Amino acid sequence: MSIPKSQSLLLALMSTLVVLGASFKLSDAEASVVQVGVMAATGSFTPSGTAFFVSDDGLIMTADHVYVSAAKSMNDLRSDRLVVRRANSTSAQVLTTPIDLVKRDPVHDLAILKLQSLSPDWKNFGGMKSLTFTKTPSEAGEKLCSMGYFGGDPLPGGLCGMFYGPSYTSLSPNDSVPEILVQLQANQGQSGSPVLRPDTGEVVGILLAIVPAFLPSTPPQPIHSGLMRLAKGEYASRLLASSK
C-alpha cells in the first residue's frame, strides 16, 4: 500500500522537526551567555551579572539592575568601558568587547545592550548563538534550567530546577508586576541569566533575584529559600521588538 505524496511530505517534516528539537543540548547555551561588567584602566574586570544574545547583530538581554550595578561601578572606578566578557569553561580563553545601552525597562527589571563591534574573534570563540523566547506558558513541575556565570566562568552544564508558579512584585499598593517563580539554587553573578527549556532552548524568563526566607531567630537570619524570581519572557520579547 503506497502512502500519498502529501502524507509522505508531512511525515518527513515531522521527522525533521523531531530531530531538530532533540538536537539541542543545554551545554549549547554556553555560546549564548556572556558576563556584563566594567573594565578598569588597569585591565581588571569587575563583574555585575550575566546576559545572553537575542539577535545575530550583537544585541544582548540582561536584568536592568545588572546594568545599573555596572554603571555604578563605572562611576566608582572612573572607567568608561562597559564591556561583555566571555570565558570558556574548558580553557583559559577570555574575550572582551565594549557594549552600549540600547533600551531599559526598569518596571520589569530588563535591559538591552549591544556589542560595539562584531569582530571575527567571536566566531572563533564559539559564535554568538542567539536565544528565542517561548510563546507557550510553563506548567507546574516543568523542568527548567539556567545558564549563567558564577565568579569568572560559566557554569558548565548549567543549573536545573522546576517551574513553581506565577508571582507578583508590588510597585505600589495599587500596582504590581507579574513574574515567575522557579525552584532553583542559583548563585551570585547569575542575575540576568536566561532560564530555558533544556530540550528546546526556548527562554521562559530572565533570572532576577532570590526570594528571601528567614530562620526563626533574633534577629531573623536570611537563608536561600530555593525560589528565584524571573522576569517573564513575554515582557522581554516585547522590549526586544520595540528596540528594533
Image (cartoon, rainbow, N blue to C red):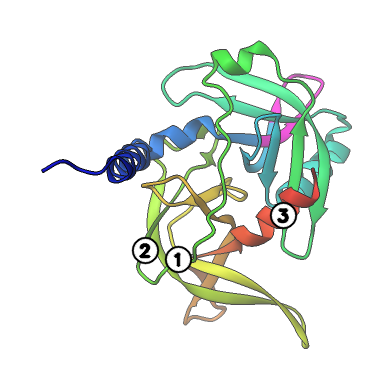
Identify the element where label 2 is drawn: loop
- Mark on residue 76? none
- Mark on residue 142? 2
The amino acid pointed to by label 3 is Leu
Contact, mark 3 vs mark 1 (Cβ under 8 Å) = no
Which quarter shows the N terminus? Answer: top left
* Residue in front for this viewpoint, 93 or 182: 182
Image location (x, y in percent) of residue 204: 52, 57
Tell me the magenta residue range: 36-45
Tell which tag, 2 or 3, sits nearer the viewer: 2
Name the residue furthest left: 1
Contact, mark 2 vs mark 1 (Cβ under 8 Å) = yes
Which residue: 79% across, 51% down?
242
* Residue in front for this viewpoint, 99 or 123: 123
Distance from disc 2 to disc 1, alpha carbons, whole Å, reads: 7 Å
Instruction: State the residue position of label 1.
Output: 138
Which residue: 80% across, 40% down?
73
Instruction: State the residue position of label 3.
Output: 110
When asked about the image quadrant of residue 37, the answer is top right
